[in-house]
Image (tube, helix red, strand yellow):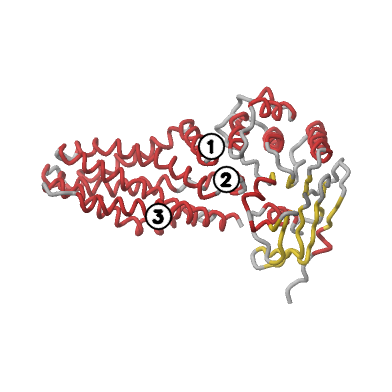
Amino acid sequence: MHFSGTDLSCMRGGRAVFDRLSVTLAPGDILTLTGRNGSGKTSLLRLMAGLSPPAAGAFSWQDGPVTEDPERHFSRIAYIGHADALKPVLTAGENLRHWAAMREPAVSVERISSALATFGLAPFTDTAARYLSAGQRRRLALARLLTVDAPLWLLDEPTIALDADSRAVLYDVLKQHRDAGGMAAIATNVALEIEATRTLDMAAFAAEPAA
Amino acid sequence: MTGFSATLRRELTLTLRQAGDSAVIVMFFVLVAILFPFGLGPDPNLLARIAPGIIWVAALLAAMLSLDRLFAADFEDGSLEQLALSPSPLSVTVAAKLAAHWLTTGLPLMIAAPLIGILYNLPTNVFPVLLLGMALGTPVLSLIGGIGAALTLGARRGGVLLSLLVLPLLVPVLIFGTAAADAALGGFSAKSPLLLLGGILLGSLAIAPIATAAAIRQALE
């Protein structure tokens, strides 16, 4: 299932961030978004997620525009933003279970434990999230990817706070997702040790400064 | 309905883990009500007459105190983004959060209200009507308050702005809630104020989840 956005423009606080940007993802694609700070990488991911509407242009799946059925779109994406969306008083397991419970069909207990184990968090299943380190919190946020069946992953700087071993786990997970026909769009400021099938340099779409 | 039950369960677990938050709201409610007799003097007849009004005003103020954090914590830690991106409709998720808010603040306030009634020498035959009025009115505080809490997301001093925005809208609840208890106190039928409260509740039930969801989407843009 292809996902594409055409002729996208983005406005933030009255300023044009990027203009006439088009992007397409096919099954098995890993797209990296590069560009200096403020070039609109996060904004583009948020547009792709459907958190904010583009100032111009539209996104569509192969079977219809995103705006036609937003809930179907939400069921096809997994978005991991800057914030980890973890509740400090809930345990790692509870945090993960909650986000899995928000989707249908129900996710098995084994799948939750195996997602935690993949990211090396099995010993912390019953530990409150407030006792986790920044890297562990990031891994817990990423473990959410393994509990949902979303073909399109939208990752905003996923490697932040991760050590080398955890990055390797993330790359493995991404490769498995890609080999299974999944897609991912990754905004990043660092070189990823994974082969991207497409790259998008935001500088090419920088909006003309307003006169 | 997956979104509703999952969110309700999470909210109730969170409140249980942070039980102090709810307890503080109830203590504030009782404390505000206890302050009035110190200023007004110990006349038992006067206190019985003003008790319903005091209870309702204190409940309104206590609700304002709790609404502040209704969506703000989720907004700051990124949970609200994830809730908005979940395949379950946001208005349903929001309805679950509002239901949880009532269960953890409105309901405890209702349970604490008879205590204040006794302190104010309110005749016990007024309690059923007072509580029925609160059962119909306190959910409106959560529902209308939810709209305000969502509209003030990300605003500086959102808590103060929230009170300015929401308190005027809750005046009808205050009027009819007090009127119902007053009617019972005077020996009249409390049917019409209670019916009006019920009408306000049904209206807010229909509007609030949708309006709140729209305000949240606006805040996340």
Viewer-nearest residue: A108 or A170: A108
Q: Earlier in the sequence, mark 1 or mark 2?
A: 1
- Tell me which chain the residue with mark 2 is part of: B
Q: How many marks?
A: 3
Vertical relation: A126 (above or below) A141: above
- The reply to whether the C-beta atoms of the residues labelled 3 and 1 are less than 8 Å apart is no
Could you tell me which secondary element the residue under label 1 belongs to? helix
**Residue A102 % position (x, y):** 59, 39
Residue that appears at 30% across and 57% down: B171
| Mark 3 lies on residue | B163
Amino acid type, mark 2: Ser
| Mark 1 lies on residue | B6
Viewer-nearest residue: A33 or A60: A60
Could you tell me which secondary element the residue under label 2 belongs to? loop
Q: Which mark is residue B88?
A: 2
Viewport quadrant of the C terminus of chain A: bottom right
- Tell me which chain the residue with mark 1 is part of: B
Vertical relation: A117 (above or below) B175: above
